Amino acid sequence: MKNTLETRLGIFVALAVIAAVLILEMLGGIDRFQRGYHLNALFNNVQDLKVGDRVKMAGVEVGRVTDVRLTNSQVLVTMKLGAEVEVKTDSLAKIQFTGLMGQNFVGLQFGTPAAPLAAEGMYLQTAEQPDLSAVMQKIENVATGVEKLTQSFTGEKIDNLLGPFTEFLKANQEPLTTTIANIRNITGQISSGEGSVGKLIYEDNLYQAAYTSVTNLQDLTADIKLGLADARQAIADARETIAKVNAGQGTVGKLLQDDTLYNETTASMTNLKEILQKINQGQGTVGKVLNDQELYKNAKLTLQKLDKATEGLEDQGPLSVMGLVIGNLF
């Protein structure tokens, strides 16, 4: 290849194009020349977020960071999103990173479906991501604690750790052997169905008794429910009857609510009182019968004469009596 002016010019143009592409990529790529809208978010710590970093939603790149600056003791992050990207007003923005050594990016949540869409220049709600340095410091502290724990066992023999336990087993060998033998005997009896526990496990009597008790309890509950239903029905009927009585329906209702019977009873009692007063005063036939002494004397004499007449008839024969009767009649 000849070192001509055209060759050097071509190399210069190629390098310029490569540099321009790199600069555009660092500043956000060709997204700066595409249509879209801007959204803002305020953070307490952006964790090395810089202009040109990606904005993702559900792992999909939807825009780039166009500005990062301090304002009012916070960091204002401005993002440019594609015109087709729909972000809700209640979407949450969070600074995240891809791995421990990865690049930071702004992650956006979808938000609720019913929320309206975010407009140009709107501020989104934010959530702070734990600082990576603080997380690493905590991991370092945990590692230091583990290291100290392992160092505490350094130089210790297994006999020193298990020695007291071994001595305890040796000192109580006979009681432990007896206890284990007793446990074996008990478990053997239970497995054979002996004893109270064995019978409870293997015999059906307890199950049948419990089943019968539960059945009886269910029947009793059903009877109680039926009785409560009858009681509710009786109360309802009583309420209905009382309502009818209060409404003046039926015989009892009319007796309690209708004034006609009361008025008629009052009038009858008044009339009866007047009749009794007249009788006591000797007025009318009954009053004269009850109060006239002459009528009483005449009735008494008549009865005395009748008594004597009957005595005379007893002394005469039947034919004489028939003759007297016929004579009196004809």
Image (cartoon, rainbow, N blue to C red):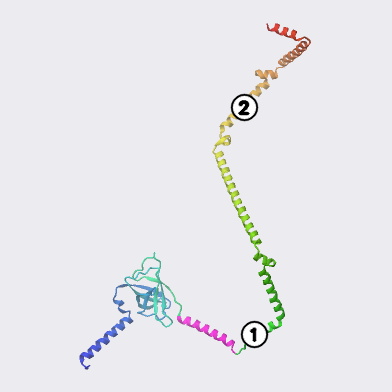
Question: Within the image, what quadrant is residue 179 found in?
Answer: bottom right
Q: First in sequence, mark 1 or 2: give its number.
A: 1
Q: Position of residue 197 (x, y in %)?
A: 67, 67
Residue 133 colored in magenta in the image: yes
Residue on which disc 1 sits = 162
- Vertical comparison of 196 with 268: above or below: below
- Vertical comparison of 109 with 169: above or below: above
Q: Residue at position x 23%, y 88% from top?
A: 10
Tag nearer the camera, 1 or 2: 1
Q: Along the line of sight, which residue is nearer the eye, 312 or 17? A: 312
Residue 141 colored in magenta in the image: yes
- Is 201 placed left or right of 49 in the picture? right
Label 1 to label 2: alpha-carbon separation: 117 Å
Specify few, some or many for label 1: CA neighbours under 10 Å numbering under 14, 14-19, or 20 or more: few
Magenta segment: 132-154
Amino acid beneath label 2: Thr
